[in-house]
Amino acid sequence: MKQYDIIIIGGGVVGCMTARALSRFNLKILLVEKESDIGMGASSANSAIVHAGHDPYPGTLKAEMNRLANPMWDEISAELGIPFRRSGAYIVAVGPDECGCLESLLERGHENRVPIEMISGEEMLRREPLLNPQVSGALYTPTAGMVDPFAACIAPLENAIENGVEVMTGTAFTDFIVQDNKISGIRTNRGDFGCHWVVNAAGVYSDEVMHKAGVRPEFKINTRRGEYYILDSTEIEMSNILFPVPTGVSKGILVFGSTHGNVLVGPNSQEAPDKEDKAVTAKGLSEIWQSAQKLVPSITPRAIIGVFAGMRASGNATCKVCGIDYHHDFVIERAEEVEGLINLAGIESPGLTSAPAIAERVVELLKDAGVSMAVKKDWNPIRKARPRFNHLSRKEQAELVGRDARYGRVVCRCEMITEGEIVAEIHAPIPARTYDAIKRRTWLGTGRCLGSFDMPRVVELLSHELGIPVTEVTKKGPGSEFLVRPTKEVEA
Amino acid sequence: MTLKDRYDVVVIGSGPGGLASAIAAKKNGAQDVLIIERDVEPGGILLQCIHNGFGVEVFKQDLPGPAYAQRFIDEAFQVGVEFLLDTMVLEISRDHRIIATSKRHGFLEIQAKAVVLAMGCRERTRAQVRLPGTRPAGIFSAGTAQRWVNVEGYMPGKNFVILGSGDIGMIMARRLTFEGAKVERVLEVMPYLSGLTRNYVQCLMDYDIELQLMHTVKNIIGKNRVEAIESVAVDEKWNPIPGTEEIIPCDTLLLSVGLIPENELSRQAGVAIDPVTAGPFVDDGFQTSVPGIFSAGNVVHVYDLVDWVTEAGLMAGKSAAQLVQSGKQTVSPVIPVKAGENVRYVVPHTLCPDHLADGEIRIQMRVRQPIEQPVWVEVRSGEKLIHRKGEPYTRPGEMVTIPLKPAMLDAVKASSGLTVSIVRR
């Protein structure tokens, strides 16, 4: 049985950031991910916002992690080559009735020690002319930002690999190996692995993982689905992040410009007992549309070029701070019932924002537990982003094509993704072995043709580069093959 | 071929519109004519259309797509059109500077005296028709499936449901059946066919493939691969009718739900786009709102027959060559042409009466909904009838053409605007 100091379960943004933080130390680390690629759960489908931190219930872990993590994003995105824009965000009141909400939100923002200011409806309209002219006021949170959510997983884990962390995808945790009430390893579909510590970063399955060790039997993830719609950048251009005044359940349905240039609307919040049910619904669409048009009346469903749904890992953990009555807090703690387990659970929004701070908290928890944490002398904090043809100036593009002709062939015409970029991702430290893996890394196929043009070409490239038949190329892992057989072979 | 950095006419795209434009430009006196094509060989989407039905109007022959394309490819080479293949145009400026990139030819900058846009169209997607459900493998546009089957030689599924009665969808229904797949159903949300009647007869009826009008997909089921779709009947306003749901097991859903002219490059160049056609506003010589930038074929509006695309390409190429040679814009008055009763749009959007002296000008249109009885296609100037033509019926899937003749020159000249309508006889 292969031995590790620490095994991280789950390759979402929390697991990936934790792997990177722990890679600073002289520890033997393995990250296991059940899916064919990392970042396929909640981390792949969210609002991609680095929240200012005005919204979480004051005093909770959510509020604390958000406040600690927000300032970390400048350095971490620069070190790791993650697209990040500190654009600020607005919470917008429309009509006379919503203005009152802003006052209490402002107070909460102050309580959370987050930079926040009130601006007039007039000023808001000047800053975002597409906004509903009925806007009656807004809160501005200058420290909010927008990040590439896929790079936020891939970049830290690539950096972790560079610093010695091992990663196994397609490896599903099935049980713990426990000796004398101390965890000594995990069982997976690909064999057993020994370790001293396990970090449970299993996202929507984090409750089931901890229950296997008999921990917090009362803790439950009640997944909530959020649907999003992506709009054509030629139909609407907007770089601001606009929140409505919040509802009781969520921060409401946003209209926001992504790091990628498209405007997105969403999410709604629907109870979804099946953790895998990421279907979009007709009901969701009309719900999202009503709210979105209240903020930006000119947007039309005609501009939709993409849809997706994500799953929030909403937990039922009670905030442990005395006197705070809040029951959906993050779980970031050493398990009490068994030795050798750290649970990172119920990490819904602001989870992406908080991930770098959660990772540092794991370091502290391990130190507190007496784990010897010697810093590696040769730790390299830098991960260089690979070139993105479409982000370069014409001059840089010409130079890149001159250096490597494969960057001269455009494979995805809407997003202008080249063969060179695709091949580089297939052979990257975390190899992109499926269509969707390439999509998450390059944004290929996310444009207005939704991949109709690039799909046969990418399937061919994957087959060629991986040395597998085209019939074995998948969209997102086994069972999602594109092609079933060559033509002219009629089944009996 | 030595690539030059200046050309008289550069054509973007080598489908039927682009090929015809380049040939016509060359034949009408343009010296250096270049086609830039993103695929590795010329011909465009015709190369994957291996079924017949091409050339009945132009050649009076019923050809498969690649054979139709080959005639024009051969002619283009013969008259000396140059080709730049495997090359993607990134940008066209208002003053006709073209930036392109290629694995074979590197990064390129080319100056043209005139440009013909012939980028064709793309297929509408699942997101654009807002199909609910999961996002497994096995949801493809009919054109993507067509490329896989006819060009790459692979089957993208075993049991198909096709949403939309567009031509590519119906043709693929037959093609997949030939290849041993089962096409369970074709669903069409409208109360009528969106493609050609001849394709319904030859592709669906002849192979006993069921078409359900006023039906759509209510849900897509399956996590990794499509496992089934849930169909539902709809009323006239596309509202699902409760109780009519049906689960149809299948592993693939093909979408044939419409085509959209591909005008991202045109927009970048500042070309004004008609929101109804989604293509450029054009005059009768297919010049766009930007002087010296022409457009031809499905990039202007979606045609029903390739023959008309060729015809449009010939006209665009000729106009481009004339502009290049005269070196200046003709500054004669133009007359707007508008869509009237029952007409969804007309192309061209404007015409120059002087051109009518040289030969007929063909006005083409699509109707809003089927009229299954004899009609008049009328061209009026105000109340005054200038020309009319009888048709036995009109259907949205089939384009309608009415030619204006040189004999009508005086009436057209006197007009401040023409309106084209379709009225019951």
Image (cartoon, coloured by chain):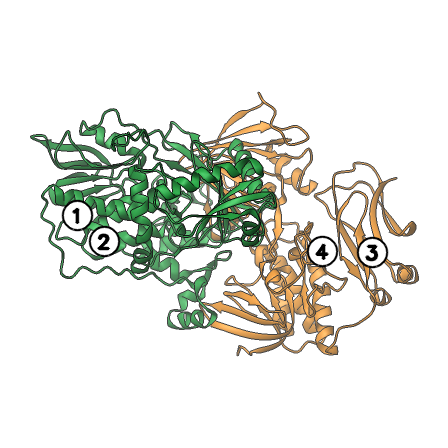
Chain colours: A green, B orange
Circle 1 chain: A
| Quadrant location of the C terminus of chain A in the rendered image | top left
Residue B304 to residue A228: above or below:
below
- Disc 4 marks which residue? B308
Q: Amino acid at mark 1?
A: Ile
Q: Which residue is found at the position 70% from the left and 76% from the top? A: B324
**Image quadrant of residue B241?**
top right
- The residue sitting at the top extreme is B243
| Real-space Cα separation, disc 1 to disc 2, in angstroms | 9 Å
For disc 2, the chain is A
What amino acid is labelled 4 in the image? Trp
In the image, which is nearer the foreground, mark 4 or mark 1? 1
Q: Is residue B318 above or below residue B387?
A: below
Nearest to viewer (mark 2 / mark 3)? 2
Residue tagged by mark 3? B403
Residue B184 image offset from top left, x and y in percent:
54, 32
Tag 4, which chain? B
Do tags 2 and 3 sit on the same chain? no
Label 3 marks which chain's residue?
B
Mark 3 is on which residue type?
Pro
Q: Are marks 4 and 3 in contact (CB under 8 Å)?
A: no
Do discs 1 and 2 belong to a common subunit? yes
Q: CA distance from mark 2 to mark 3?
A: 69 Å
- Residue on which the image places disc 1: A29
Front residue (pair B290, A449) = B290
> Which of label 1 and label 3 is nearer to you?
1
**Are the residues flagged by discs 1 and 2 in contact, CB closer than 8 Å?**
yes
The count of marks equals 4
Give the amino acid at mark 2.
Ala
Residue A43 horizontal/vertical position (percent): 35, 43
